[in-house]
Amino acid sequence: MKFREKLNIPKIPERELVKEVYKLSKINWGVDDGFYPLGSCTMKYNPRINERIASFPEFCWGHPLLADLYEGSLAIIYELEQLLCKITGMDAFSLHPSAGAHGELLALMIAKKYFIEKKEYQRKYVLVPDSAHGTNPASAAMCRFEVKEVKSDERGNIDIKDLASKIGKESAVFMLTYPNTLGLADERIKDIVKICKDNGTLLYLDGANFNAIAGIVRPGDIGFDFVHLNLHKTFSTPHGGGGPAAGPLGVKENLKKYLPYPRVNLKQTNKEVKEGEPGGKEIEKEIFYLDYSNSESSVGKIESFFGNFPILVRAWVYIKMLGEEGIKKNSQTAVLNANYLQKKLTEKYHLPYNRICKHEFVLSEKGLGVKVEDLAKALQDEGFHPPTIYFPLIVKGAIMIEPTETETKDTLDKFAQAMLKLFDLSITNPDYFRDSPKKQAVKRVDIVKANRDIIPTDKERNNEKSNNSK
Ligand SMILES: *Cc1c(COP(=O)(O)O)cnc(C)c1O
């Protein structure tokens, strides 16, 4: 190889490149542009101080292979683990998983090993509610479990009879989202815990909706065996389009030995005599170190080094800044905001599960004069990012709204006004929606054409060629 390969870089002046990138950034929509009520995703304001601290050179430039030298970074990992344990009532956390789905996968790997060690080889099923996020069955399948779907009842709770008929000595894990993706807390959670315990089935909390209950409910106290949190949702990190993310997994004591290694641990605080001080005043020194002691019992490594470190720093700053009271108030405000909007919108929109909600709620298309996707497109022209639509699947034409705690009443009122206006318009003038959005950089995408005239990638095209030539 030549030392200096001539690279084929297009000759564009830097000035032109900057202009182009800046233009693209302006036609994008982010959480700092305005209201982003994407249900299930918890798109909240990310305080700037998180960014400031996460970009300290000491955090950015530390090489993970020299982790021993970065005691401050290790201290943050250790302390964040402790904080998450305290918030959730769990006994240990692994900060390694790099997404919610990754935390689910780790949990199921742990369950697999746990039951193999107990010689309960017959436990091949993972139970998943019909309202669950798609990652739940996907994670179960990746771990070679078979998925059994559990029905929801007419109030949006787990159908206890259905659960009882499907759970048994062959069920390894029940994955429950609490509050669920309808934004509702299961009213019979205690019965669910008991049914799982009676059957020896591990109870897993998909904690992606933790924004509703942080500081109020501790899953460890209710009886959950493990839980993943989405730091990029509940504990504020800019995310979207698939990342960046962190989905730490918390476990109870009996599952702790299976967590990935190394774990950051704290050595017995050594008393150190400060040199040169008369009388030798003793100071305490904390020594953090990488603990490999569970490498035999662990399920192994699931991520290089220590997980998505900058996101861990952001979450740590966020929790330290808010404190216990602040976290509780956040959840209360998130729930209040959701109920306020729910109340306003149900003036016209249909609410299939008519209950006080937690941090989000799900409306349906019933009564709307156009398709839900038309409404979503038109909302963009009103200056709002559309809510999550067509999920969860158990609501036909779902419109899933999560305002979070970081929006003002004024913003919520304006959004409600736009939603109600579009509802009326969908009945009086449905044609208005046909070419929505009208004011955006990217206009209406032709979905029918996109489905019919698929443009394959080079790879697929090449595969097709070689198949045809056989
Ligand atoms: C976001 C979410 C997940 C998955 O988290 P990712 O970080 O996107 O992998 C799982 N369950 C629920 C309920 C979620 O909202």
Image (tube, rainbow, N blue to C red):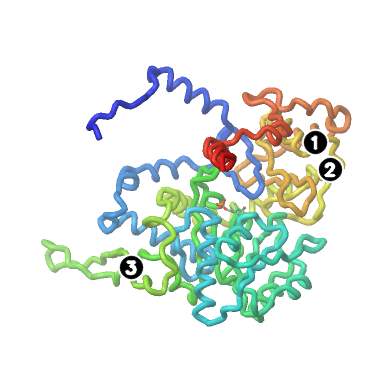
> Going 58% across and 60% down the picture, which residue do you hit?
139
What residue is shown with label 1?
420
Amino acid tagged 2: Glu
Instruction: Note whether 273 is above or below 49 in the view shown.
Output: below
In this rendering, the label closer to the viewer, 1 or 3: 3
Mark 1 and mark 3 lie on one chain; the one further toward the N terminus is: 3
Per the image, label 3 sits on a secondary structure element best described as: strand
Q: Three-letter amino acid code at disc 1?
A: Leu
Which sits earlier in the primary sequence, circle 1 or circle 2? 2
Q: Disc 1, disc 2: CB below 8 Å?
A: yes
Q: Where is residue 71 in the image (x, y as percent from the top left)?
A: 29, 57
- Left of 14 or right of it: where is 100? right
Asked if marks 1 and 3 touch (Cβ < 8 Å), the reply is no
| Residue 273 image point, x, y percent | 17, 67
Q: Residues within 10 Å of mark 3 (few under 14, many from 20)?
A: some
Label 3 belongs to which residue?
A: 291
Residue 31 vertical placement versus 193 (above, below): above
Specify the quadrant of the image occupied by residue 133.
bottom right
Q: N-terminal of the two: label 3 or label 2?
A: 3
Left/right placement of residue 50 relative to residue 326 reads left
For disc 2, the marked residue is 347
Q: Measuring 63% from the left and 47% from the top, which residue is drawn there?
A: 404
Separation of residues labelled 3 and 2 (CA atoms): 57 Å
Label 1 and label 3: CA atoms lie apart by: 57 Å
Identity of the residue drawn at 58% across and 57% down: 328
Q: Is mark 1 within 8 Å of ligand 1?
A: no
Residue situated in front as seen by the camera: 462 or 448: 462
Q: Which amino acid does label 3 sit on?
A: Asp
Q: Is residue 405 shown above or below 448?
A: below
